[in-house]
Image (tube, rainbow, N blue to C red):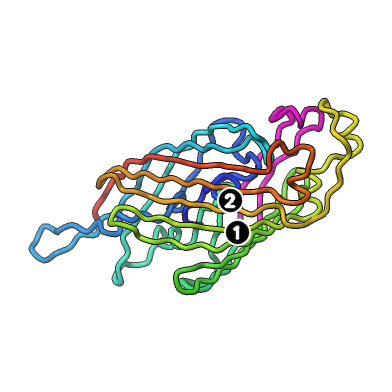
């Protein structure tokens, strides 16, 4: 989704995917919604009637506020750098590697970076990649003694279809390195609108279906884990099913020609066996991101 870390699990980082310190991330036009002001960054050229197309890159910093783990009632704040390239496109804008990359990559979070392989404005099919790091047993009192859940590289695929002002999409996401955790399936509907010359915002609603393996990895408690549990957790077995529903709101605001403010907030509600898990402190999960960047221009 264009307002990415909306984040944290769906706008942002799933399952503490940023734990352990500062993570360097390239938010290529997907951190909030697309760069609105840059689309109007046309200035008079040196001669009367000429137009110079301005390209830019915004550099800055962002802060992610997210639960320490899925189901936690405690939050952590994680700083990340922002790198947002933007290129004005007109009918006669020549194709090039930067234009191609910007059009093909969408940042939904560190565990869901989408790369379009086929399609265009109305229908898309592509790959998904990303990374999820370890859920540490020290992230909460209920996790102590259960051991860590190892992180790893995420791979998958997605498809999306745009009908009018709304885009419907589905994604398959699975961690393919490290300890197996099982796949997830995300379904969403989103829309965005240019509210003013400087403000653009988007809204996304959706749900996540998790496999039985994933549910057991993050919400189940085996007999061995129950024996080691410092909190005295009981054995808890899970099946696959709907893990959560979520709503995300994100946007970008051009404070000036140079300064851009981006942000997003995500609310998700754990459901059924995920919500009833003994490792869950609260089923209500809120996360958000805010970032400020300075835009550097260069003329073509």
Number of residue marks: 2
Cβ–Cβ under 8 Å for marks 2 and 1 = yes
Kindly indicate the quadrant of the structure image that contains residue 91: bottom left
Seen in the picture, residue 17 relative to 143 is either above or below; the reply is below
The location of residue 290, given as percent across then percent down, is: 44, 40
Residue 117 lies left or right of residue 201; in this view the side is right
Provide residue 56's location: percent of width, then percent of height. Answer: 31, 50
Residue 131: in magenta span: yes
Please tell me in which quadrant of the rendered image residue 158 appears: bottom right
In the foreground, 203 or 120: 203
In-image side of 16 versus 143 (left or right): left
Q: Residue at x 30, y 68 (%)?
A: 90
Dot label at residue 206: 1
Quick one: SS at disc 2? Answer: loop
Tell me what residue is drawn at x 73 percent, y 55 percent.
Answer: 210
Q: In the rendered view, does 296 fall on the left or right side of 12?
A: left
Of discs 2 and 1, which sits in the foreground?
Answer: 1
Q: Residues within 10 Å of mark 1 (few under 14, many from 20)?
A: some
Q: Residues within 10 Å of mark 2 (few under 14, many from 20)?
A: many
Magenta span: 129-155
Where residue 248 appears, as percent x and y from the top left, is 52, 52
| Circle 1 SS class | strand
- Is 93 placed left or right of 24 in the picture? left
**Residue most toward the left?**
48
Number of the label disc, if any, that sits on residue 10: 2
Identify the residue at image location x=62%, y=62%.
187
Distance from disc 2 to disc 1, alpha carbons, whole Å, reads 9 Å
Q: Quadrant of the C terminus?
A: bottom left
């Amino acid at each position: 989704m264009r307002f990415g870390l909306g984040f944290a699990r769906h706008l942002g980082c799933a399952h503490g995917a940023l734990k352990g310190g500062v993570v360097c991330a390239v938010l290529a036009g997907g951190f909030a919604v697309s760069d609105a002001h840059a689309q109007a960054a046309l200035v008079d050229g040196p001669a009367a009637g000429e137009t110079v197309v301005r390209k830019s890159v915004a550099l800055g910093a962002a802060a992610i506020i997210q639960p320490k783990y899925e189901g936690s009632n405690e939050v952590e704040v994680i700083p990340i750098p922002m790198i947002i390239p933007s290129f004005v496109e007109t009918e006669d804008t020549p194709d090039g590697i930067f234009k191609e990359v910007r059009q093909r990559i969408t940042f939904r979070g560190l565990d869901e970076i989408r790369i379009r392989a086929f399609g265009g404005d109305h229908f898309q099919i592509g790959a998904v990649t990303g990374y999820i790091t370890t859920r540490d047993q020290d992230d909460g009192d209920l996790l102590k003694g259960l051991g860590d859940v190892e992180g790893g590289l995420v791979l998958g695929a997605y498809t999306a279809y745009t009908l009018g002002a709304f885009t419907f999409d589905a994604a398959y996401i699975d961690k393919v390195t490290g300890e197996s955790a099982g796949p997830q399936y995300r379904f969403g509907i989103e829309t965005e609108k240019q509210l003013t010359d400087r403000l653009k915002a988007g809204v996304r609603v959706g749900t996540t279906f998790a496999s039985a393996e994933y549910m057991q990895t993050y919400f189940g408690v085996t007999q061995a884990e129950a024996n080691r549990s410092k909190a005295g957790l009981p054995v808890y077995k899970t099946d696959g099913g709907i893990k959560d529903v979520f709503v995300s709101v994100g946007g970008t605001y051009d404070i000036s020609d140079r300064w851009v403010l981006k942000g997003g907030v995500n609310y998700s509600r754990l459901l059924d066996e995920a919500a009833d898990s003994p490792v869950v402190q609260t089923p209500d999960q809120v996360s958000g991101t805010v970032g400020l960047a300075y835009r550097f221009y260069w003329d073509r």
